[in-house]
Image: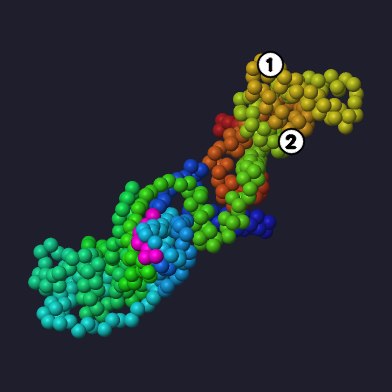
């Protein structure tokens, strides 16, 4: 019954840890490596107009939850204009106002976007009414009906119907019906308007969506009109020039509908142009901004919200469970003898500052000198507590002496010996001396070397950059480590070192 309880507990802990980690990676976009970089788009809209010496109001459509992107940041450069933003249906607009506006004026809107393949914004609203069939004049009526009949025969639903219509409408060698409808269509906006007019003949709801094609280092470009049709469930976008459905990764839906992109009162009509650039940012920064946009409290109450100095402390502390896990493996499965249970991990923490080779040299030197002095104290027949206090004092004096000597020799790395936990060193010296007296020098040396070996392995694990990063950014993974530790705590089988003891009996049976 206890085994089942432990297994169920371990399973729940593992599910919570892995599930939280997957949510952070898939939904919030946290990187699983410390050097993750991602690309972001910076789009700058520039409005230029002429003031007429009176109070002026200017409005411009700006993005609102564009599909395929997360808006990480936005800025307005208004230069003395009052600013407000408001939602109008599925769109959003910026409103500028000022008194006594004279001469040429320039307003800027800047937005930072990160590609988000999981961000399929709701394109179901608003649900449109089916349009009435327009009263086409002749000969347009005959051309439209003939074109719709041909398209209907070569399609199965609204999406395929629209795709086929666009392909025929864009055919380089169109039939006479398409040629008639394409006459006197100059701008892309006029072509989209005519296609919508034809779709109304089939009672298919449609609307125009103004998009921006994102290309790096673009200094001056404009919005392009695209087509969206409603398939009964949601709006589906189409490139009117190719007939391809859906928004590609580099197409930003800026605004939707027939409303003007800009409007002005007591000023000339604003000229709207765009500049686009692409740059790299740390994935961590992008993920934190995305989490704020999603109102996710997971990162707000994570270690990333702590002051930087406190974060640096936890970056070290959260690696301790990794070292503890190493101790469990080495003692319970391999049977490596050590002085104390977690003393090697504290030594491994000191190795992080002294670095491995110097740490081994300094640790071995201190312990060797301490043991020799401890043997001298044994002859004085001191009680336990005074003897331990004496060892602590001696260890501190030895640390100071080694630091001075190494400094005089030009070995500045030796100064880091002060980072060793002196009480742990004192207890190691005491335990090694007692083991030497009770079990002999061989057992004492084996335990000492075992402690050093575990400390080295613990240091290598705890100092690994990837593991350090994962434990700090995804501390929930320590629940998985806890689950594994609980399962290992029920292990009562043979240890690796014990197999050597049974080698002779196994070979005797074979004989």
Per the image, label 1 sits on a secondary structure element best described as helix
Q: x%, y% of residue 160?
A: 24, 70
- Evaluate if marks 1 and 2 touch, with contact meaning CB atoms under 8 Å apart: no
> Which quarter of the picture shows residue 400?
top right
Task: Give the residue displayed 45% in from the left and 57% down from the top.
Answer: 79
Rounded to the nearest angstrom, the CA distance separating label 1 from label 2 is 35 Å
Give the position of the N terminus as an image quadrant. Answer: bottom right
Please tell me how crowded label 2 is: few (under 14), some (14-19), or many (20+) other residues with Cα within 10 Å.
few
Q: x%, y% of residue 305?
A: 60, 52
| Nearer to us in this view, 61 or 13 | 61
**Residue at the disc numbered 2:** 340
**Residue at the disc numbered 1:** 408
Please tell me how crowded label 1 is: few (under 14), some (14-19), or many (20+) other residues with Cα within 10 Å.
few
Whether residue 234 appears in magenta in the rendering, the answer is: no
Judged from this view, the residue extending furthest toward the left is 176
Which mark, residue 272? none
Residue numbers of the magenta segment: 43-53
């Amino acid at each position: 019954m206890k085994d089942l309880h432990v297994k169920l507990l371990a399973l729940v802990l593992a599910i919570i840890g892995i599930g939280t980690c997957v949510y952070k990676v898939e939904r919030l976009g946290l990187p699983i490596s410390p050097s993750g970089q991602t690309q972001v788009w910076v789009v700058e809209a520039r409005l230029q107009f002429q003031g007429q010496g009176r109070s002026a109001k200017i409005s411009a459509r700006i993005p609102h939850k564009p599909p395929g992107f997360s808006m990480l940041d936005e800025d307005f450069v208004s230069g003395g204009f009052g600013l407000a933003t408001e939602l109008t249906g599925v769109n959003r607009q910026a409103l500028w106002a000022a008194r006594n506006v004279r001469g040429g004026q320039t307003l800027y809107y800047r937005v930072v976007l990160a590609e988000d393949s999981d961000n399929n914004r709701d394109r179901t609203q608003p649900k449109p009414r089916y349009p009435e069939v327009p009263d086409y004049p002749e000969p347009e009526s005959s051309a439209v009906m003939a074109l719709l009949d041909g398209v209907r025969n070569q399609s199965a639903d609204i999406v395929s119907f629209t795709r086929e219509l666009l392909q025929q409408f864009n055919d380089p060698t169109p039939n006479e019906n398409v040629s008639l409808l394409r006459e006197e269509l100059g701008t892309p906006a006029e072509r989209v308007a005519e296609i919508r007019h034809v779709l109304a003949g089939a009672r298919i709801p449609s609307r125009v969506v103004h998009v921006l094609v994102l290309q790096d280092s673009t200094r001056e470009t404009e919005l392009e009109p695209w087509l969206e049709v409603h398939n009964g469930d949601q709006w589906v976008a189409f490139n009117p020039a190719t007939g391809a459905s859906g928004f590609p990764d580099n197409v930003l839906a800026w605004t939707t509908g027939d409303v003007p992109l800009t409007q002005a009162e007591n000023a000339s009509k604003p000229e709207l142009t765009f500049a686009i650039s692409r740059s790299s940012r740390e994935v961590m920064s992008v993920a934190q901004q995305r989490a704020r946009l999603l109102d996710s409290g997971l990162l707000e109450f994570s270690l990333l919200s702590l002051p930087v100095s406190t974060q640096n402390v936890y970056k070290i502390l959260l690696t301790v469970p990794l070292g503890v896990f190493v101790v469990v493996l080495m003692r319970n499965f391999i049977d490596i003898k050590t002085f104390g249970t977690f003393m090697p991990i504290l030594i491994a923490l000191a190795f992080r500052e002294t670095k491995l080779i110097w740490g081994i040299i300094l640790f071995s030197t201190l312990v060797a000198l301490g043991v020799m002095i401890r043997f001298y104290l044994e002859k004085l027949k001191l009680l336990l507590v005074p003897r331990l206090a004496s060892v602590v004092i001696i260890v501190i004096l030895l640390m100071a002496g080694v630091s001075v000597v190494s400094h005089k020799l030009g070995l500045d790395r030796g100064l880091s010996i002060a980072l060793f936990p002196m009480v742990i060193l004192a207890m190691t010296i005491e335990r090694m001396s007692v083991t030497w007296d009770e079990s002999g020098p061989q057992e004492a040396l084996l335990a000492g070397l075992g402690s050093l070996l575990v400390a080295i392995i613990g240091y290598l694990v705890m100092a690994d950059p990837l593991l350090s990063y994962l434990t700090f950014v995804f501390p929930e993974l320590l629940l998985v480590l806890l689950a594994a530790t609980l399962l290992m705590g029920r292990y009562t089988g043979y240890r690796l070192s014990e197999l050597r003891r049974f080698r002779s009996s196994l070979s005797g049976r074979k004989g």
